[in-house]
Image (cartoon, rainbow, N blue to C red):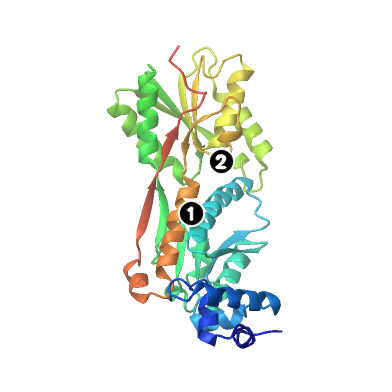
Amino acid sequence: MANIKDVAKRAEVSVTTASFVLSGKAAEFRISETAAQRVMEAADALDYRPNYHARTFKRGRSDVLGFPIVLQDPNRYLVGFWQGMLTGVDLRAREDKCDVLMIGSDTPKDTALRAFESVRKCQVDALVAPGFMTYFLKDRPGYKKMPIVFLSPDQVTEHPSVQLDPMPGLQTAVDHLKELGHASIHYVAVHGSDETPVRGNLLKGLAEQAGLSFSIGNIWSKTLGRETEVSSYIDLCRINYAAQLDSDHPPTAIICRNDLVAIGVQAALQDVGLRVPADVSIIGFDNIYAQSTYPRMTVISHMLEEMGEVACELALSMVGKDKVFKALRGHVAQVPSELIVGKTTAKAR
């Protein structure tokens, strides 16, 4: 197999010149077009392929970011959640000509440990990881010194993290419903969810500030396990909400815990002859499945791609830069949520 010395010899240039040309730096180092052309022709003629591992060792980086993902995660909703963020990570990484390596295994713990080893062995420069992986990594030797950015961690971490700020989207949603003439807001939560008290309290405060009445109902999470398939999740929400719905005096505006709850609630309303949005306006949260509904759901977007892009930016900034790594210790970047107005909200009846 030809090496860079063979290419340089055939092109009649120095090894340094050949290296600059093959790494795309000919213009930066003012190498003539003629010389650059000879190098490229020589590389083609010799079928030259750069030694990836040698280059990585020499430069001290691989230009690869790791993204751990559980391959057999029974929670299909979370799979869509992380895939949205992965898209954002990949888009931002491409701008720096970096690749993203998906690191997977069948369980969260095994996935986290494989990702940990990939950094330790310098297979990737940094990790952008789901927040729950802090549980499996926090006691590993060397963990605190690893360049990792966590997405939506549910506990405090010394590493930088990216989280959603739900307030802007909720505020816009309340304003939107008030402008449509709604006098009250009903929030359908998932009982036992970590988000329920936080988001419910935020909505209650915003509704009261807007002069609107507020009520809350719960979908009981005992029937919604991690292994619940998407279609079953929707059906359970439909049945659960139907049991608490007063069809003679339904709410005129509903905000739901997530997209699937909103789809289930809409189905329950339609079962008793209530029209969306003519009779009841519905707003979902996350925008994972909302974009596939008909009519297109009004939804508060979790800004998954944007969160991925911000996390990738932080990860890239830390690679090989100890001062930046130390400066970002404990840093929390918040991405503001946004309301996307669809076809499931209308003027109050």
Q: Which residue is mark 1?
A: 308
Q: Is residue 250 visible?
A: yes
Is residue 237 shown left or right of residue 189? right
Q: Quadrant of the C terminus?
A: top left
Q: Please name which of the two marks, 2 or 1, marks the residue nearer to the observer.
A: 1
Q: Is residue 130 visible?
A: no
- Secondary structure beneath dot 1 equals helix
Whole-percent x, y for residue 282 in the image = 50, 25
Image mark count: 2
Whole-percent x, y for residue 32 in the image = 49, 75
Whole-percent x, y for residue 92 in the image = 48, 57
Q: Kindly identify the residue that appears in the image at 60 percent across and 82 percent down.
A: 11
Q: Is residue 217 above or below residue 74?
A: above
Query: Which residue type does callout 2 highlight?
Result: Ile
- Depth check, front residue: 67 or 143: 67
For label 1, the crowd category at 10 Å Cα-Cα, with few meaning under 14, some 14 to 19 and many 20 or more, is many
Q: Kindly identify the residue that appears in the image at 49 percent across and 14 percent down.
A: 249
Q: CA distance from mark 2 to mark 1?
A: 14 Å
Quadrant location of residue 219?
A: top right
Q: Kindly identify the residue that appears in the image at 66 percent across and 58 percent down.
A: 71
Quadrant location of residue 236?
A: top right
Is tag 2's residue or tag 1's residue first in the polypeptide sequence? 2
- Depth check, front residue: 69 or 6: 6
Q: Quadrant of the N terminus?
A: bottom right
Mark drawn on residue 288: 2
